[in-house]
Amino acid sequence: MAHPSVRAVRLARNKKSRQPGAVSFSPLANPATTPAASSDKALLPLGALMLAVSVSGWAQSVTPAGTTGASATTSTQTQGKSLAPVIVRGTHDRESQTYQSGITSVGKMPVAAKDIPQSLTVVNEKLMHDQGKDSFKSALENVIGITFEAGEGGRVGDNIRIRGFSAAGDIYTDGIRDIAQYNRDNFNTERVEVLRGAASMLFGRGSTGGVINQVSKQARLITEHEVNATVGTRGYQRYQGDFNFKLDDDAAFRINAMATDSDGRGENASASTHRRGLAMDYRFGIGTANEFEISYHHLHYNDKPDWGFAWLNSRPAPSPTNKYWYGLTTDFQNDKADTVTLSHTHRWADGSSLKTTLRDGYYSRTLRATQASFAAGTTLANLNANTVVSRGGTSAGNAKAGNEHHTFLQTDYLTTTQWFGRKNSLLIGAEYAVENSDRLSYPFLTGAKPSTTVGNPSSVGIGGNYTQRLETSFKATTLGLYMQDTIDLTQYWKLIAGLRLDNFKADYERPTAAAPNNGTLARSDRLLSKRLAVMYQPTDEVSYYAAFGTAFNTSGDLYQFDALSANTPPEKSRNTEIGAKWELYGGDLSIRAALARTEKYNERNTDVATASPTNFLLSGKRHTDALEFEVAGRITPQWDVFAGIGFMKARIDKTTAVAELGQNPGLSPSRQANLFTTYRIGDKWRIGGGFTAVSTNKPANNVTSTNRAPGYVKVDALAEYRVNQGNTVKLNIDNLFDKVYYNTLYRGFAAPGDARSVRVTLTSKF
């Protein structure tokens, strides 16, 4: 129900918008003629908080491009001094949206996608709603270059790779790091933005392959509500409510609630998911000199996890392992995420703005999962319904827990000035973060998990002592300062240059480890990240660019050290890219093309020549070359399309493991493509569908393995009927031809994608 993304090309040209939801702000008055005294800049309540940590003055602005509502013009007052009027235009009817990205904030500025000199894909609310995507992971299936790793190896929750590089630590919500380990739902998501290529200048550590930013729904100046009720096969039920209240001329409150229940794969007891979510957002001072926002987000999962099945003869285990779930009724995955966010935006009459955001989040997870595999000696020749299936040994296997507490303070300042006769758009920012992460185990779970058989799995339950024990404790603090300047060299040429300095400190304790590894490990790193790009925009509809950026990965990115990594400096990466972006059909259709190389040029390697090394060697090198094409928007008033095709070539160039030289590092399929399109027939009907295609893929972290998941094409379909002005009925058929495919891979096992499902959604707006 949230307002559509705003198409910045409309803002730039100031033409009549043909996309409802467009938001424009009238040019602010000249500071020489508009009273905007410097005393205004003292009105920064949260900015003062930033001074307390000695990073005041470093910030980035976010002009409120997300403000929407009925057509309105408001004149703001600050201590009796008038600001230029803020003009809000357009409707917020999702049916009138296209699949275009519109205004994006992933570059820390509210600009058009065509003004971002990097590969960018935006999955907006309309696309997610039309496809019936209910989770963060399912929404990302629309993005070429994205692959999924199973939640093993000490991690649970969303585990994503971009161009073959891990992005587990590169997930953000509203521009603030969201690194906690949990599965995310999109019930409160306005859009998902995927920026590819090294981006540490904007986001700090990590971001080698790119970053993924979730944009939350905000309260808007209109009273409007939407309820969605979905039922489907395998017991699927999902109920969502989105209620927005206009409280005053500049105040609004929004609440989103969700409940989802579903049985997963399996003709027996089966895996399952039970999710509950609540999000509340209160904004006041909207469009005025001082705008405040208070939001709360809660998500709770109570699942029986599905970890697929072990590989057999270098391939995913054959049927019927894709039809059955081999877990235990006492398996569980219980994740909770609770965050509170406070933000303040101050705007000056000269167009400058300062936004300061404070977020505090608590996250917990508990897991007991089953990793199914065949008994020793099983081959394709002797596999049958009576073949014994092992459930992973002892009861303590794949049982883990964790607690995380993250606090982020970020302030961002944006202003425009004239230097040397050229327009300069300045971004100045600072970030301070405190991240605490504890990992726990269940050491008193004893005994063996009972085995079962391939064709008739018995999902029994087993008990045990669920007393937890602290295994590791990690605390990290980060201070980052950054500055970027966008210079209008000529009417058609722009230069973007930016620098960021990060200071990352971390302490790691392992109280249960044996000596000498039971002490405290600590490390401190200071890194400089760079970004440089040039854009040529001969018309409002065309943008060509060349870009360069760097990234770094500290040894403590994902909250752990060992005796070697604690003595190892960060890895470094760089991204070089050229591309073009076009707006066709009056701006209704966006097309982009990009050619990029992402290169990690000092990857960690084990020192095989030293008997007792004290650190890793930074002697490795790997790269991914990517060629991408993407289309999003509206071809005719009735015909919407979202499509992409990508080609990747990933290679290991240097390593101390000679057998890995020249190999694909994994989770980097050579080809990916997707398409989703809809067509409106008259006033009542809309039909559509699409496909997702991935070539042969293999797991990461085991480069010389011969395990391979075959390529696949999965087809989806849609039919929608508009009952009346406020009510629609939508039918989604996912995996129309019931294709068996594997899209979640780990070195030990592969998990199949969803079988065919049918879902019917009733949407009511009032």
Image (cartoon, rainbow, N blue to C red):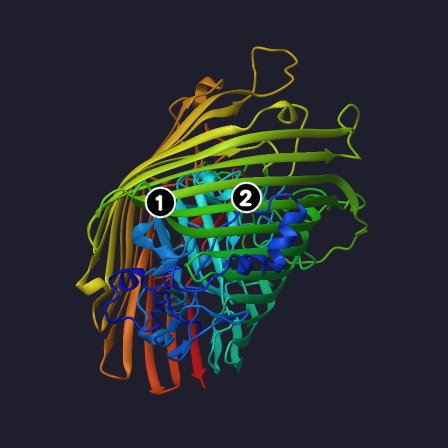
Instruction: Judge whether 554 appears above or below 440 on screen.
Output: above
Q: Could you tell me which quadrant the C terminus lies in?
A: bottom left
Front: mark 1 or 2 = 1
Which structural element holds mark 1?
strand
Spatial separation of the CA atoms under disc 1 and disc 2: 28 Å
Residue flagged by tag 2: what amino acid is it?
Gly
- Give percent across and percent down for residue 109: 42, 53
Instruction: Judge whether 494 appears above or below 26 on screen.
Output: above
Residue flagged by tag 1: what amino acid is it?
Thr
- Classify 10 Å Cα crowding around label 1: few (below 14), some (14-19), many (20 and above): some
- Give percent across and percent down for residue 556: 62, 35
- The numbered mark, 1 or 2, whose residue comes first in the sequence reads 2
- Give percent across and percent down for residue 159: 52, 47
> Nearest the camera: 319 or 97?
97
Q: Which mark is residue 327?
A: none
Question: Which image quarter: residue 129?
Answer: bottom left
Image-based side of 241 in relation to 180, left or right? left
Image-based side of 187 in relation to 478, left or right? left
Q: Which mark is residue 486?
A: 1
Q: Could you tell me which quadrant the N terminus lies in?
A: bottom left
Q: Which residue is mark 2?
A: 169
Which structural element holds mark 2?
loop
